[in-house]
Image (cartoon, rainbow, N blue to C red):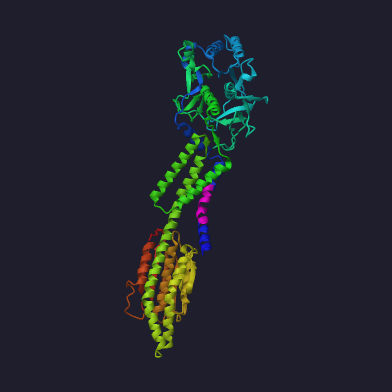
Amino acid sequence: MGTRVFKRWLLDGVRGILPGIPIVGAVVAARLLGIFQPFEWQALDAGLRSRPAEITDQRITVVAITEEDIQAIGEYPLPSGVLSDLLTDVNQYQPTVMGLDILRDIPIEPGHKDFIKTIQDLDNLVVINKILPPSIPPPTDAPESRIGFVDTLLDDDGFVRRSLLGATDEHNNYRFSFTIRLAEAYLVQAGLMLENGLRNPSAMRFGSVELVPFEPNTGGYVQTDAGGEQILINFRSGSTPFDIITYQDIQTGEFSPTLLKDRLVLIGVTAQSVKDIVNTAAIDGFNPGLVTGVELQAHAISQIINAVLDDRPLLRGWPDWVEYTWIVGWGMLGIVLARFKIKATYYFVSLVILVLGLTFISYGLLYIGWWIPLIPAAVAFFLNGVALYPSYRRQYELTLRLEDRQQLIERTFDQIHNGPLQKLSTILSRVSEDPNFSSDLHRDLRSLNQELRGIYEAMQQEFLVEESCCLQLDGNRIIRLNQPLHEMLYEVYEHTLQRNEFPHFEGIKVHIRTFEPMLEQGLSDDRKREIGRFLEEALCNVGKYARSCSRLVVICRQEDSKNIIRVVDNGVSQDPNQNYRRIGRGTQQATKLANHLGGHFERQRLEPRGVCSELYWSTRKAKWKSR
């Protein structure tokens, strides 16, 4: 018995998750196709943007050439002499390393020779070039070890989320980026050299910290070009991530020398007119979504230095199999929640709470450097939770109705068993001992006793049939309700006329029957069962009361815009004064059924003899009432 219960439980569990599997599969397929990629990018940006503000990075300072500075200088592009003087002035404050984030591939006089000499003399200076087409060369005669490229990787939505650390140029020579050159120059002061990774030989490493390489499917990315050495940028949060000094501040000396001494100093143009601006929604600043090129470099360098020296987390994603297990798991959780037997209000509150919980989990993991699939997991969970709940709720309510029906069966049979059946047993005992009673009467009483006791078993069997999708007739005849209505009614007709306890069926010589397809859209199994019971009861009335019946007409079909079930006999009533409009049990049930269908029921005597029982309902209105 335990094994049977377990198998039943297991089967119910498997059936329970089946409706949600296509939804989970669709979500997984959509992610594999990249449909969720833009939304996952936005979720990443929102998560990074909403983190608590970090303290200003004490290792990096930006020397910004603003719009006001350009106006004071009086020309743009800036003359090479101006840049040479600026580099010399900044270097007097003994920075650890300087980075000039200004392209200078052609001479801009006056002062170009001085500029070239300054570059060669300052061994703590890194300058820039561009290696991806269209390439831009570095300043003339700049030492190779102090050149880094500033090529930017844009996602399909035009935003920057990745930093390119190393790549091959158009001549197939491997080059390092401005970011990695400056980070290396700063960290070498702490005895940390740039090396290959230990766990992943293709990764870059400083000491024990490996820079997590970007893969084609990292985080929410789908089949993205991962050429070269790339990492995700964990932008520094807060409105003042870095100290900023302007060109005019350097000229006037109105700043604290500690902002330059022993620091990594980035020099670049922040003037809006120059348009050295990139899009990134991960920074919540004065111009959300916009950041200057020199500030972008500051964020990319800062994350490397602080990861190595302060254990600040780098962004990384889960392996693919873990991500998809996570998505499927949340989809399954949606199925499990949908099967909870709770009120709709509590259910949807639980749904919202769990989605918020998933969001907080995602946010918490992002805070420590893990980018997990929030959007597809939430979609799989929410779709299953919303789509399956009505179905499971109906199934639960059906189970409750079946349980109520079972209890009613038990109570009804208990009353029959403890009352009429006990009296009938006493009568049978007396009859069997009295020789004056006829054997036919004795046989009929025994048959009645068996039939009454068989009612319980018949109703139990009907109850136990899966989803109660059957109609149980006399003699344990089961008729399936999932067949067309007219075919089901024909089976009821055929079986009922074969019952031998109705004497007036034997005299019927003429059978006129019509069973044609009927419009049954919207009819539930319960309604079809009630319609079958109606036909059975109408035929039983003919067998019980229609004396001398020789002709029976049964019509079940669609006429115009109505479904009609009509039973007509030409028998003579046992009581000529019988009123066929009286409200008996059969009439009550038929009238109730007609109301549910939005139709009409009528039973009337015909002249000179016979009775017509008719049930019809409109197919045009398609109005099916609930119980």
**153 shown above or below 145:** below
Q: Position of residue 559 (x, y in %)?
A: 43, 65
Q: Residue at x 33, y 72 (%)?
A: 581
Q: Position of residue 336 (x, y in %)?
A: 48, 51
**604 shown above or below 286:** below
Residue 536 visible (yes or no): yes
Q: Is residue 64 left or right of residue 216?
A: left
Secondary structure mostly seen in magenta is helix
Q: Position of residue 344 (x, y in %)?
A: 39, 51
**398 shown above or below 155:** below
Q: What span is in magenta?
A: 13-24
Q: Is residue 385 left or right of residue 104?
A: left
Q: Position of residue 91 (x, y in %)?
A: 54, 13
Q: Say which of 59 and 246 sits in front.
A: 59
Q: Say which of 492 and 573 sits in front.
A: 492
Quadrant assignment for the C terminus: bottom left
Residue 559 visible (yes or no): no
In the displayed image of the protein, which residue is found farthest to the front? 191
Q: Is residue 468 left or right of residue 596?
A: right
**167 shown above or below 569:** above
